[in-house]
Image (tube, grey):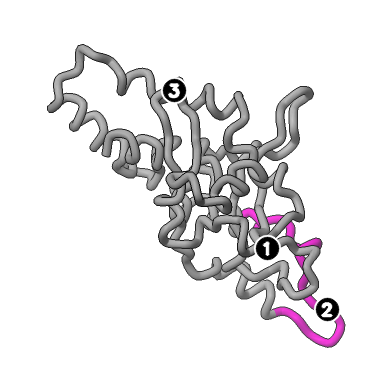
């Protein structure tokens, strides 16, 4: 889970909400078209185009806007940009396991769910050379609960992480070559994208 630094909400969202009057109040259900696209694009950009939870590459047609605190909570403003993230998975394919925002659904517990908006979230998780994820400390029950509630340890994600790790484990690489490879992998590209499973690579090699 990579730390996300929230930015200000898109101008299109601010202007749309400012249209509120006695006859109309903006709601999340009304958020459509260019305004919703602007919100989702802003979320993807501030996350470096990786999922807010598992860090897979975000694809526009296979991702969704995620309310960290569920909008079913009456105390939550569904249009509060500071509570919005972008999670992978949109329409599930047949047989595809649910994870991240789709598995979390409306569950929320501030004591047991680690937030990607918390600056120390990256330090709460550890990784192994075969793609497993686990709490960085055995006593961190919130990290364990977060892994379970988001499905971060499911076989599909473990296999994807292991695949990413393969070239880093090439024994023919010299120490200098590996260091250069890691540095390049951890660098945002010209389009502002982070590489997939960024925190795993930094944890194991950075």
Q: Is residue 21 magenta?
A: yes
Q: Quadrant of residue 169?
A: top left
Give the residues drawn in magenta, as a range: 19-37
Residue 69 — which label?
Answer: 1
Residue 84: x %, y % from top left = 61, 61
Between 49 and 101, the residue placed more toward the observer is: 101
Residue 29: x %, y % from top left = 80, 61
Label 1 Cα neighbours within 10 Å, binned few <14 / some 14-19 / many ≥20: many
Residue of label 3: 130
At 80% across and 77% down in the image, what residue appears? 25
Q: CA distance from mark 1 to mark 3?
A: 32 Å
Q: Which circle's residue, 2 or 1, is located before the other in the chain?
A: 2
Residue 22: x %, y % from top left = 84, 87
Q: Is residue 192 magenta?
A: no
At 53% across and 22% down in the image, what residue appears? 159
Q: Which circle's residue, 2 or 3, is located before the other in the chain?
A: 2
Between 35 and 119, the residue placed more toward the observer is: 119
| Mark 2 vs mark 1: in front | 1
Between 197 and 122, the residue placed more toward the observer is: 122
Considering the numbered disc 1 on the image, is that residue within a helix, a strand or a loop? Answer: loop
Q: CA distance from mark 2 to mark 1?
A: 25 Å
**Residue with the most extreme front position:** 139
Residue of label 2: 24
């Amino acid at each position: 889970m990579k730390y996300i630094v929230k930015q200000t909400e898109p101008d299109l969202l601010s202007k749309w909400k400012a249209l509120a009057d006695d006859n109309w109040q903006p709601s999340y259900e009304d958020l459509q078209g260019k305004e919703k696209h602007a919100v989702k694009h802003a979320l993807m950009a501030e996350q470096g185009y990786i999922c807010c939870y598992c860090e897979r590459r975000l694809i526009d047609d296979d991702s969704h806007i995620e309310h960290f605190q569920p909008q079913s909570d009456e105390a939550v403003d569904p249009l509060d940009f500071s509570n919005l993230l972008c999670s992978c998975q949109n329409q599930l394919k047949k047989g595809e396991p649910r994870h991240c925002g789709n598995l979390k659904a409306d569950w929320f517990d501030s004591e047991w769910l680690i937030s990607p908006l918390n600056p120390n979230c990256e330090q709460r998780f550890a990784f192994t050379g075969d793609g497993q994820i686990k709490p960085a400390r055995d006593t961190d029950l919130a990290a364990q609960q977060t892994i379970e509630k988001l499905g971060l340890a499911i076989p599909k994600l473990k296999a994807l992480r292991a695949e990413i790790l393969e070239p880093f484990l090439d024994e023919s690489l010299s120490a200098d070559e590996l260091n250069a490879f890691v540095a390049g992998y951890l660098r945002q590209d010209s389009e502002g994208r982070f590489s997939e499973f960024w925190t795993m690579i930094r944890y194991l090699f950075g």
